[in-house]
Amino acid sequence: GAVVSQHPSRVICKSGTSVKIECRSLDFQATTMFWYRQFPKKSLMLMATSNEGSKATYEQGVEKDKFLINHASLTLSTLTVTSAHPEDSSFYICSARQEDYNEQFFGPGTRLTVL
Amino acid sequence: GESVGLHLPTLSVQEGDNSIINCAYSNSASDYFIWYKQESGKGPQFIIDIRSNMDKRQGQRVTVLLNKTVKHLSLQIAATQPGDSAVYFCAEKGYTGRRALTFGSGTRLQVQP
């Protein structure tokens, strides 16, 4: 099956710093990538949808200036949490989808802890 | 608005028994449904999917049933094993052209040896 990787898998940072998370589709071209966040014992909440070469579409309530998303190529999307605060601590998961296919393939997630 | 929900937050079964996890959805225009398994600290893993023009689909040890009349989806796991212990999410995609999935709240399956 298709493989999606995320890096880093775990990151701890100080409040006020920025953190970049990478999402890569390893064996297919992902025309669309999605970013989710998940709090403990909760479901996945969609943050934004990114299409290669265009601006991301953010869900209501998600600050686009705080969560910067770049989808520069068909195999890479990045999420940058700017000026992170403790309330941004969460599990961030990306998924990738090929054109004309419904199925999404999920990355292993990134655990962000902001001190 | 759209919502996907689950009836039971936790399901405990004995090893070897069959498990049934249920999910209700509210968007009658949803055309594609997926079940995911998520182990602690990991991303969701695809289990099985079904389109709205079907009412049943079988995989290896898993079966998904779709009842569009009552907007209900279920996942059946045969001969449940300890390795099946995880949180299971149903997700749906609607006709609106929205490519993203809407996830249900999840059910934790605990398999007792």
Image (cartoon, helix red, strand yellow):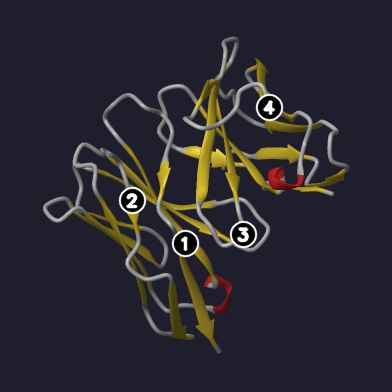
Residue named by callout 2: B4
Q: Secondary structure at mark 4?
A: loop
Q: Amino acid at mark 1?
A: Tyr
Which is more foreground, mark 4 or mark 1? 4
Q: Chain of mark 2?
A: B
In space, the residues marked 3 and 2 are separated at their CA atoms by 19 Å
Badge 3 marks a residue whose secondary structure is: loop
Same chain for the residues under marks 4 and 1 in the image: no
The verdict on a common chain for dots 2 and 1 is yes
Q: Earlier in the sequence, mark 4 or mark 3?
A: 3
Q: Position of residue B17 (x, y in %)?
A: 40, 84
Most extreme residue toward the right is: A14
CB-based contact (under 8 Å), mark 2 and mark 4 = no
| Relative to A11, residue A35 above or below | above
Q: Tell me whether the residue at label 1 lies in contact with that at label 3, contact meaning CB atoms closer than 8 angstroms.
A: no
Residue A12 placement, left or right of A36:
right
Residue shown at the point (76%, 41%) measured from the top left: A85
Q: Is residue A110 visible?
A: no
10 Å crowding of disc 2: few (<14), some (14-19), many (20+): many
- Give the vertical position of A46 relative to B110 (above or below): above
- Mark 2 to mark 4 CA distance (whole Å): 28 Å
- Residue beneath the point at 69% across and 32% down: A23
User: Viewer-proximal residue, B88 or A67?
Assistant: A67
| Marked residue chain, label 3 | A
| Disc marking residue A66 | 4
Tag 3 and tag 2, C-beta contact below 8 Å: no
Q: For the residues carrying marks 4 and 3, which lies nearer the camera in this image?
A: 4
Residue placed under numbered mark 1 in the picture: B88
Query: How far is disc 4 from disc 1 in space, using C-alphas?
Result: 30 Å
Mark 3, residue position: A40
